[in-house]
Image: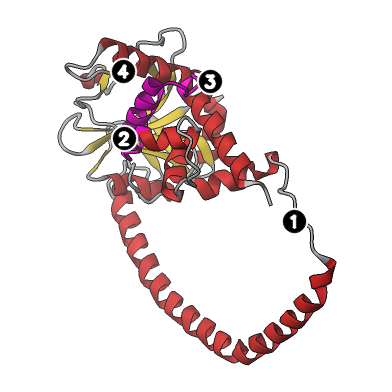
Amino acid sequence: MADKNALIALLKEKVETVVGRHIKTPKDFELLSQRLLDETTVQISATTLKRLWGYVNEDVSPRTSTLDTLSRFVGYDDWAAFVIANEHLIEPAEEPETDPSSSAKESEAKSEGTKVKKRSVFFAIAGVLLLIMATAVFYTRHVSKQVAELTDSLQVLSSDKYTILAGDTFATYDAYLNLFGVQADDRPWAQPLPGHSEICIWGPEFHNPHWHNDGDPDSLLPTITEYWNVEGADPETVHLRNADHFTYLRYRKELRITFMKGLRDSTFTFLGLYVMDRQQSDSTRIVWQRISKECDLTRLDFLEQLRR
């Protein structure tokens, strides 16, 4: 089994790659804490980050919730998904040596444990059967609900019910996320397409006080100029925030399936498929260029070719 400390060290390296700098000064930890809040809506204090990076010498194991947030920040669903994807890069932890003199005692203990297990087999089987029955009831109800939601979503599409066209509108995040087999979590505006970590189902607000999305609404935003700026914010903080965002996206080659909230009313308007315009983007802003006004739900794997 891969060493947990080695995996945590790898996770920290990936975080530093995303932010484009080594995290080693008090200001670095403050900026990382703010960026985590902006991109994951989860607050991790600078003090907690200092402990994790070893800036504060305290032998405290990080919480799983902290590792989950950092894993989502670098593009994974949670800590467990990060471990599965990266444990092959880590050497297995060494098994502790076994004292030969204890083998007889261990054998005796195993024998007694086997007897206990045999006595509990009947009860275990009964419990499993009850769990299967309860799960079947829950699953049936859950699937019925999902089918109903998906049917409602399909009814709002254009004439071809399997293709979303620019201008189609959706009432909620769930109304369009269900079409891609995605259930909204605590970050519904930026969801990865299942099986395609670098294709993002993006649903920002047109008039967002933090992340601005400039463009021509009358033409359904053929280009979207994205940048971070909060009224009254320190200019250096604004510069670092946008520079970090540019550094992260410059190597990602991300494709965005874009739904914009508040473009015409309170609904989400589908705008099309967008990629980063590398000639116009820089450390002050990201310019997204629309490459298609439609998304064929039956050919989602084809989007990887568009991304490249």
Residue 32 vs 69, above or below: the answer is above
Residue 237 counted in the magenta span: no
Mark 3 and 2 residues: CB-CB less than 8 Å, in contact? no
From the image, which quarter does the C terminus lie in?
top right
Q: How is the image coloured?
A: secondary structure
The answer for how far apart the CA atoms under marks 3 and 1 are is 41 Å
**Residue 119 appears at what percent x and percent y?**
63, 92
How crowded is the residue under tag 1: few (<14 C-alpha within 10 Å), some, or many (20+)? Answer: few
Q: Earlier in the sequence, mark 1 or mark 2?
A: 1
**Residue 169 appears at what percent x and percent y?**
25, 39
In the rendered structure, which amino acid carries the disc numbered 2? Gly
Please provide the residue range marked out in magenta: 19-46
The answer for how far apart the CA atoms under marks 4 and 2 are is 15 Å
Mark 4 and 2 residues: CB-CB less than 8 Å, in contact? no
Please report the residue visible at 19 percent of the width from the left and 25 percent of the height from the top. Answer: 209
In the rendered structure, which amino acid carries the disc numbered 1? Pro
| Residue annotated with mark 1 | 96
Most common SS among magenta residues: helix
| Residue annotated with mark 4 | 227
Q: Earlier in the sequence, mark 4 or mark 3?
A: 4
- Which residue is nearer to you in this view: 51 or 162? 51
Mark in the foreground, 3 or 2: 3
| Residue annotated with mark 2 | 203
Please report the residue visible at 67 percent of the width from the left and 47 percent of the height from the top. Answer: 2
**87 sits to left or right of 236:** right
Residue 2 vs 248, above or below: the answer is below
Q: Secondary structure at mark 4?
A: strand
- Which residue is nearer to you in this view: 208 or 11? 11
Mark in the foreground, 4 or 2: 4
